[in-house]
Amino acid sequence: MEFSARQIADYLQGEVEGDPTVLVNDFSKIEEGRPGTISFLANPRYESYIYESKSSIVLVNKTFIPSKAINATLIRVDNAYESLAKLMTLASAGDKPGKGISSLATIHPDAQLADDVFADSFVSVAAGARIGAGVQLHSKVTVGENVTIGDGCILYPGAVIYRDTQIGRNCVIHANAVIGSDGFGFAPTDDGSYRKIPQLGNVILEDDVEIGACSTVDRATMGSTIISRGVKIDNLVQVAHNVEIGEDSVIASQTGIAGSTKIGRKVMFGGQVGISGHLLIADGTMLGAQAGVGSSIKVPGKIWSGSPAVPMNIFRRSYVVSKNLPELQNTINALKKQVEALEKAVMSGE
């Protein structure tokens, strides 16, 4: 289906700069733009591509000021990245979900499924599970005993939901994610071995949560591990037992959060962040990639980086110094030799 620049601008409440009749029927990255497609520019680092791009339409922020002529028609919006997401959501709305229960699915008689649930081949739904309207369970999804899944959720192939997990509405759980597995709880014994501590709690995912592929969210030892409304978790993330993550937080790949840490609202964690257990992380905290957090962060809205993590202004100063360590060492060695020479001269009476 084709859309004109004018139709797109009207949908996004944007402003057309160029030919309002130009048509597009696909998306493309700005550096790989081709006629008949729409691209976007949100990051200034990619600005150079807009002057050479063959895309027919480019979404840009209203604040964007070009430094030279642009061939494409521009649609100016308040937030180009958010507007792209709206367009892509609209484009994907035409994808038709599966329908019905596969003859190869295993549904326990005591499970309750809404009439329009889709369950693909080799799906397993255990006793006491309650599955809401419009839920899609793709191939090999496993839903444990007494699990609740709210309306409109999508569980992709191989996702495993352990017993007693509660999932809100419109959540997305990607392939091979595991929700509700045992927390890492073992008690040392006198002989040096470890005795497993039963994990009796559960996991609660509130509405509009997305969990990436191969990520894990462990059940609580007691009580609940809680992922609050609107949280987005990338692939390959580990969330340990009794962790709580506040609303609208985003966590990038390979992050690990140890047990009983309480994370505030609207935090942003880069890739490979590591957080020790039993900490408090304030609202709005931003952690750079590979940050290692070993103590609580109590002041909201600050940026931290490094391992151990320090405020960004300190990290930048330290980084500048660390790059110059070889030269500083040479300077110290030269000064040391000068001091030794002066001491020798003083001792000899010269």
Image: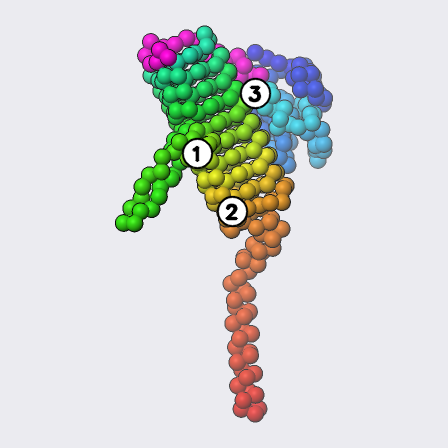
Q: Neighbour class for label 2 at 10 Å: few (<14), some, many (≥20)?
A: many
Magenta residues span 88-110
Q: Residue at x 31, y 44 (%)?
A: 194
Quarter of the image that includes the N terminus? top right
Whether residue 8 sits left or right of residue 178 in the image: it is: right
Q: Residue at x 63, y 41 (%)?
A: 301
- The part of the image, by quadrant, that contains residue 219 is top left
Q: Earlier in the sequence, mark 3 or mark 2?
A: 3
* CA distance separating discs 1 and 3: 41 Å
Q: Is there a contact, CB below 8 Å, between mark 1 and mark 3?
A: no
Name the residue beneath numbered marker 1.
Answer: 222
Q: Residue at x 63, y 24 (%)?
A: 83
Q: Residue at x 48, y 23 (%)?
A: 167
As helix, strand or loop, the secondary structure at mark 1 comes to loop
> Foreground residue, 242 or 321?
242
Q: Magenta segment: does it hold 163?
A: no
Image coordinates of residue 117 in percent, x first then y, are: 44, 11
